[in-house]
Amino acid sequence: MIKSDHITTTTCPYCGVGCTLQLHVKDDFIFKVTTPFDSPVNHGNLCVKGRFGYDFIYHPKRITTPMIRKTRQEAGKRTQAFDLSEWREASWDEALDYVADNLTRIYKRDGSDAMAVYCCAKATNEDNYVLQKMYRALFRTNNVDHCTRLCHAGSVVALLQALGSSAMSNTASQVVMNDVFIVTGSNTSENHPIISLQMKDAVQKHGAKMIVIDPRRIDLVDMAEMWLPLKPGTNVPVFSAMAHVIVKEDLVNWDFVKNRTENFDEFLESLEKFTPEYAEEISGVPAEDIRKAARMYATAKSAAIYWGMGISQLSHGTASAMALIHLAFLTGHVGRDGTGLNPLRGQNNVQGASDMGSMPFHYPGYMRVDNPDNRTKWEKAWNIEEGGLSLKLGLTTTEILGNAHEGGIRALYIMGENPMMSEPNLNLTRHHMEQLEFIVAQDIFINESAAFADVFLPATPFAEKEGTFSNTDRRVQRVRAAHPPRGMSRPDWQIVCDIALRIESRLGLPTAHWAYSNPEEILREMGSVNPDYAGITYDRIDKEGLIYPVPHMEHPGTPTLFKESFPRGRGKFHALDYVPVREQVDDEYPFILTTGRLLEHWHGGSMTRNSALNEIYPEARVEIHPADAEIHGIRNGDPVKVQSRRGEVIVRATVTEKTTVGVIFLPWHFHEAAANLLTNDALDPQAKIPEFKACAVQVFPARESDLPNAEIVLNRGRY
Ligand code: SF4
């Protein structure tokens, strides 16, 4: 048995649950991961990613030296370089000067609107805070975004409009206090495995009733009281029909509606047409089941809703989340322990990156950038002249790339994100990436997006840096270094601050603060303006973290929000209409494709596909229902071509009743069969989130020889 030199307690780098990890280290290598039984988040449990998904840190393909492309890339002719022979090593000084020179040159020539940055939901709060600060304080632009745009933007916008706050209202562990809970648009067992364990506990040990509303027969259906298998993209009619039943059968909590909400009459008028029969016609869910689910939720003493990206990743994602919010407003199932509106956040720190202002409409703390009072607060904090920060709303992730052309975005800084896997309609994304004049990639691998860059800055993964992550519960937790950075790699915040200092001197700007001696100073600077984090210090969160809002140093944290009122005052109902998904099935493309994650993998696969997890689940599989498979002559394991109007992939089929007739499912982790080659880039007009969850496709039998070969699988990004 190996005896560790030391054990480092930290937070999992994968999903938003934020499990506590104990990294067992020998000779500067992690050899085992355990978790303490008293963790308030995961109570001694870990999923396969947290337990075994750490060895990407030591993968031979990890880049630990700054690199510059040998051939200067031209806008319009930019190419991907996965092969290291197309790069040369550089010193940190040379690489940082190269970045500062080029960003400053483009900014001086084309101004703020030419500059854009992708922050990172995998990086720490401190990393994200300094990067958005650099773009706002130095380049005076709000073209700052990250992958929250691609996962829960619809939920965020709906919650902000209806309540004035976008995070989960209650903690996930409160599920054991629910009498009834709805899980919708979330394959929780694969995406948030530890929360799914708590849901199963709630049913088995505490007698809660679970209602699953999802197009797929997910694992939780086995324990559910009801399963409503709706067609992808028909959430609004189903949830609104439930609201219709609650109103028509007088199951409304009138005290709550009268005292805590507004705009009920306008909403009521719009609700009239959403009868259960109307919803059945659109969604395929029997009207009687809609009635039963509505009664069950409305008459419970304590009920909650947990939802995932099946709600938000639609061109009407905001309306979809709003229809869920209405259910809580009608019944008063929000503002008490054991109730709530709970969007389960995907990445380990997507909540924190959003809190830090890594978004085009908000400073840290969700302060609107177009509000002059907010601007003044951040100008003071950052030593900026009065009126210096921009009031103009920035571009979102998809818009940033869509504007990559002469007269638009010219320079893009990508910290840890991978738009060449995560954006919809990847063939178009590729075209946009080619148009950029200068790209900085700050990452640990040369992934599909970094391969387009001019310069690669080697950052450290979670186990080689200090900082904080904020999980889906709003719990701010410590991230700790288990061993020193490999090679010349450095923590993201240090790289960003060194570049900011160089740019500041080239622009002749007064000095905003960049010379932080440790990341806690960064968090304290942010907390001095953002009251939600005002009472958070590294000492106070040393053991269990704190659940924000934590408005002062004695405050114990706030597991349940909205007990007295909502941040906007009253909760606001909104009139809704049914808007179908943008691409309907037809004779040419008769299947609905829906996409998502697998238990063993994570997003674009940069980490899990370079870890032992890839041996457990090495290739993409498309799920197809047995009835559809029979009609198309497809057997389990057969190669098939899946084609949409935008692209095609060749994968093996899994014939399974996990999916429903007419719906196929493809995970998005596999670069050699990238699901986003097929998806539709239609955007929700308010949240600007793309429609990842529904597009029309055709499936054809293919040959073994058509499958991606081993060389393509090994050398990423050759699609
Ligand atoms: Fe990590 Fe999420 Fe698994 Fe917990 S549930 S170990 S946070 S991936």
Image (cartoon, rainbow, N blue to C red):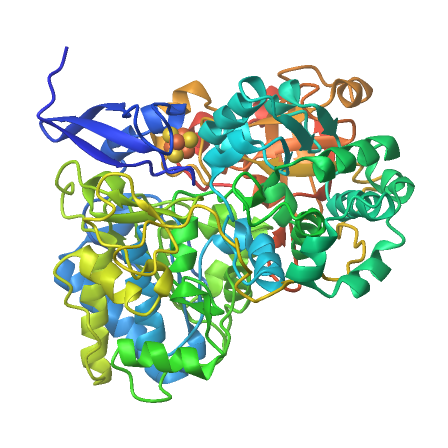
| Image position of 135 with respect to 532: above or below | below
Identify which residue is drawn at 55% across, 44% down: 342
Considering every residue shown, the one lying at the far front of the view is 255
Residue 229 is left or right of residue 347, and the answer is right
**Residue 572 in sight:** no
Toward the bottom, the furthest residue is 386
Q: Quadrant of residue 299?
A: top right
Pick the front one: 137 or 431: 137
Picture quarter with the N terminus? top left
How many marks the image carries: the answer is 0
Query: Residue, x 45% and y 40% (percent of image)?
Result: 604
Locate ligand 1 by image quadrant.
top left
Answer with left or right where residue 437 lies relative to residue 499.
right
Residue under the point 18% across and 41% down: 481
When the figure is inspected, residue 305 is found, relative to residue 352, above or below; the finding is above
- Residue 546 in percent (x, y) is at 32, 47
Q: Residue furthest top?
A: 1
Q: Nearer the viewer, residue 124 or 334?
A: 334
Q: Position of residue 376 (x, y in %)?
A: 37, 82
Is residue 311 shown to the viewer in this render? yes
Picture coordinates of residue 30 (x, y %)? 19, 27
Residue 169 as seen in the image, left or right of residue 526: right
Q: Name which residue lies at 70% across and 46% down.
A: 331
x and y percentages locating residue 356 in the rendered image: 37, 60
* Residue 437, quarter of picture: bottom left
In front of the other: 598 or 358: 358
566, above or below 210, in the image: below
